[in-house]
Image (cartoon, rainbow, N blue to C red):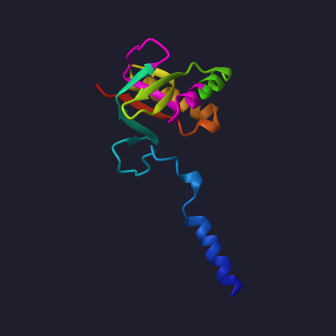
Amino acid sequence: MYKKIFLVVILAVMFGSCASKRKGTSRFDESTSPYVKEDVTVREEKVKTIDEEDVVYSFYVIIGSFQVVDNARNFRANLTDEGFRPVILENENGLYRVSVGSYNEENAARNRIAQIRNNYDKYSDVWLLIRKK
């Protein structure tokens, strides 16, 4: 009996749903999704910068998302202390995206994502935002 319970527990751990596998509601984990390319999540949104002049770029490297602007500002301050130059964006649904890179070339943005993932394990869920026109 104990062998069966042990086997069930092992199988549940190996194949079960795990929070570390989920990256939140903004993550597209299906490999057939057109929004995932080379393990980088991509979303297309209308955004505007806040707290700064709205300089328009096509691609943004997003490192955090918040519903409350003060939380985004606190996170921005922490990122600045780590050497990043973050900018806060607001999307059409009122979510605040914290960007650590703004580009007009997709490859440059993807290179920055790879660099962040290689150097900061805690930011491995960084993703690419494409500005809707």
Across and down, in percent, residue 51 comes to 50, 16
Relative to 127, 4 lies left or right: right
Across and down, in percent, residue 16 comes to 55, 65
Q: Is residue 98 magenta?
A: no
| Residue that sits furthest to the top in the current view | 53
Q: Residue at x 58, y 25 (%)?
A: 73
Q: Residue at x 46, y 19 (%)?
A: 50
Relative to 19, 95 lies left or right: left
Q: Which residues are magenta?
A: 50-73
Foreground: 82 or 4?
82
Q: Is residue 27 above or below residue 107?
A: below
| Residue that sits furthest to the bottom in the current view | 1
Q: Is residue 35 above or below residue 108?
A: below
Please count the marks in the image.
0
User: Which quarter of the rendering shows the N terminus?
Assistant: bottom right
Q: Residue at x 41, y 14 (%)?
A: 54
Across and down, in percent, residue 29 comes to 44, 50
> Residue 4: which quarter of the image?
bottom right
> Residue 6: which quarter of the image?
bottom right
Across and down, in percent, residue 132 comes to 31, 28
| Residue that sits furthest to the right in the current view | 2
User: Which quarter of the rendering shows the C terminus?
Assistant: top left
Foreground: 112 or 90?
90
Foreground: 85 or 92?
92
Foreground: 12 or 66?
66
Q: Is residue 65 magenta?
A: yes
Q: Residue at x 63, y 31 (%)?
A: 119
